[in-house]
Image (cartoon, rainbow, N blue to C red):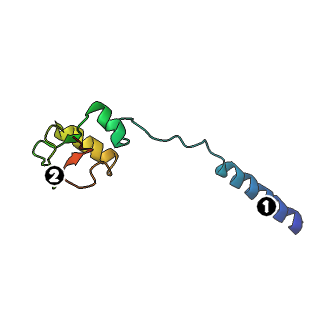
Amino acid sequence: MFKLRTAGIAIATGVIATTVGVSAPAVAHTTGIHDNCTQLNKKWPHGVGTRNAVDKTSGKRVTNFYHNNKAYWAAENHNGTLDRDNDRIACEKR
């Protein structure tokens, strides 16, 4: 009787482990515009930055980016790699 009870527990445990281990495939979270600079530059060709942002560069500065605090922080909170030089302008380009 001891062997039978142990086998029943092992079978029940296996069923539970199998049931828990099976799940739906993960769906990638994407909103489009903030996923990368290529997507962001389709909407704002010169990037998006805060109202008082100044481009950090040793060359000619980008000044014609879209100035909007809310849009910049939405992009930065979704993907923190969009503003790698931390000048408060995401995906800036001439």
Q: Nearer the viewer, residue 45 or 75?
A: 45
**Helix, strand, or loop for circle 2?**
loop
What is the spatial separation of the Cα atoms under label 2 and label 1, in whole angstroms?
A: 69 Å
Look at 36% across and 43% down and name the residue there: 36
- Residue 10 is labelled as 1
What amino acid type is highlighted by mark number 2? Gly
Instruction: Tell me where residue 48 appears, x and y as whole percent.
Output: 22, 40
The image quarter containing residue 6 is: bottom right
- Indicate left or right for 89 with 3 as reference: left
Residue receiving disc 2: 59
Instruction: Tell me where residue 42 appears, x and y as whole percent.
Output: 32, 32
Please tell me how crowded label 2 is: few (under 14), some (14-19), or many (20+) other residues with Cα within 10 Å: few
Look at 24% across and 42% down and name the residue there: 93
What count of labels does the image hold? Answer: 2
Instruction: Tell me where residue 83 appears, x and y as whole percent.
Output: 26, 50
Q: Nearer the viewer, residue 64 or 13?
A: 64
The quarter in which the N terminus is drawn is: bottom right
- Indicate left or right for 66 with 41 as reference: left
The quarter in which the C terminus is drawn is: top left
